[in-house]
Amino acid sequence: MNKPVLNIGVTGLNAIDSPGPGVAVIRGLREAASFDVRIIGFAYESMEPGIYMHDLVDRTYQIPYPSAGTDVLLSRLEYIQSRENLHVIIPNFDAELYSFIKLEDKLMQMGIHMFLPTQAQFEERHKVNLSDFGKKYGLDVPLGKAIYDSSEIFGLQNEFDFPMMIKGKWYDAYIAYNMEQARTYFNKISAKWGLPVVIQRFIHGTEYNVTGLGDGNGNTIAAVPMRKQFITDKGKAWAGISIDDKKLLSITRQFVRETKWRGAFELEMMKTNDNIYYLMEINPRIPAWVYLAVGVGQNIPEALTRLALGKETPAFESYEVGKLFIRYSYDMIVDRTEFEKISINGEL
Amino acid sequence: MKINENLAISDNGFLFNPTTGESYTVNPIGAEIIEMLKSGETQERIISRLLDMYDTDKKTLEKDLHDFSDILKQYQLLSEDE
């Protein structure tokens, strides 16, 4: 039987030491059982490695940074659509999701499907709002507060002991052991990611992550928990293992059921020595380690694509436990002309 | 004593706890004890079987088994009977 060929746009081609999820998502899509794909990469910079991985990415277009606004992005996507006839786009960066969520209806009119959290879900789970989120849905979250000025840290000393976590609105997190460090990290993060900066109580424990997919009606379509086995100096997993933690899966299903989560997600959890699971962060997208989920039997990128297209997508019922992913870096040799083309024309 | 039922142990003594993702290595006697615990043997029965298998006295064995059990409990692989 001939499988349909879908044209799918994917962002997050920065397969670097702190990788975007794009390349892993594409590997999942290429292994999809129910369709074949033509992959259109969307890149922000000309050095994103995925641009040059021609066995994975068929063609790449540069797209404008989210700071340029949704109108500029829409105009670029209209141009790309006129040439590529995209069926689906899978955005993979937190910072770009807002724009894509806002453009969902317009893109649908152009024939481009997505399966993203609603704007309310996206805002509500934001780390700035995590404390309220935990209360509303009955999930344990660490005490947190969004601040706009480093002087506010002084006033928080009664609520937050050192060490405390200092987190950026979009990315970056540091552990501050004293006031000096807290102020330094506040300045560093606010300069890079803007305000507010989030102060969070430090939780001692073991970190676990779950990647999954909600259908928007409260059903969990996929859920694979992982324990990081080896992390980089940026705290990113360089190796991890699939685990069978019933409580973690139950919290995940509770999260999806209560929020009626729509789309892919990653839950960052911390398990304390008293076996309390704190939800540290909710990433409203596929994580970079998603290929582990694909490898253990839950092809989340494929299932997400099917949901985007309105196709029946049964929930995965199992996955292999005790499988590791081990990341590696790989040097490609790239002709200068390719770099020239993406840099000058914004296309390759 | 109750061993974590999901614990996977290989012939070479590699121990994997699928709930936490943690792994350990144990020597051949440790592996035998864990297999016995997994098959539901009591502490008394384990001591008696080990006495048959190894050239040692009961007191030493009891002490060593106690130490080993403490380590397993510390890693949350073993819990007291409910």
Image: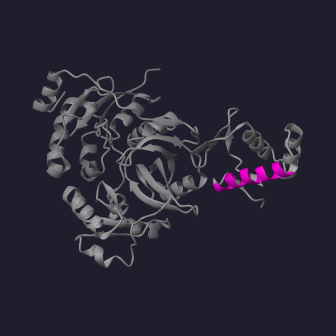
* Left or right relative to A293: residue A189: left
Q: Position of residue A47 (x, y in %)?
A: 21, 34
Indicate yes or no whether the magenta region holds residue B72: yes
Instruction: Answer with the quarter of the image where residue A159 lies.
Output: bottom left
Q: Position of residue A160 (x, y in %)?
A: 39, 73
Q: Is residue A337 above or below residue A218?
A: above
Q: Is residue A235 above or below residue A298?
A: below
Q: Position of residue A278 (x, y in %)?
A: 49, 62
Q: Is residue A55 above or below residue B61?
A: above
Question: Which residue is nearer to you in this view: A263 or A144?
Answer: A144
Indicate yes or no whether the magenta region holds residue A216: no
Q: Is residue A38 visible?
A: yes
Question: Which residue is nearer to you in this view: A223 or A35?
Answer: A223
Q: Is residue A222 visible?
A: no
Q: Which quadrant of the rendered structure holds the C terminus of chain A?
A: top left
* Left or right relative to A215: residue B5: right
In the image, the segment drawn in magenta is B59-74
Instruction: Answer with the quarter of the image where residue A310 lies.
Output: top left
* Left or right relative to B45: residue A94: left
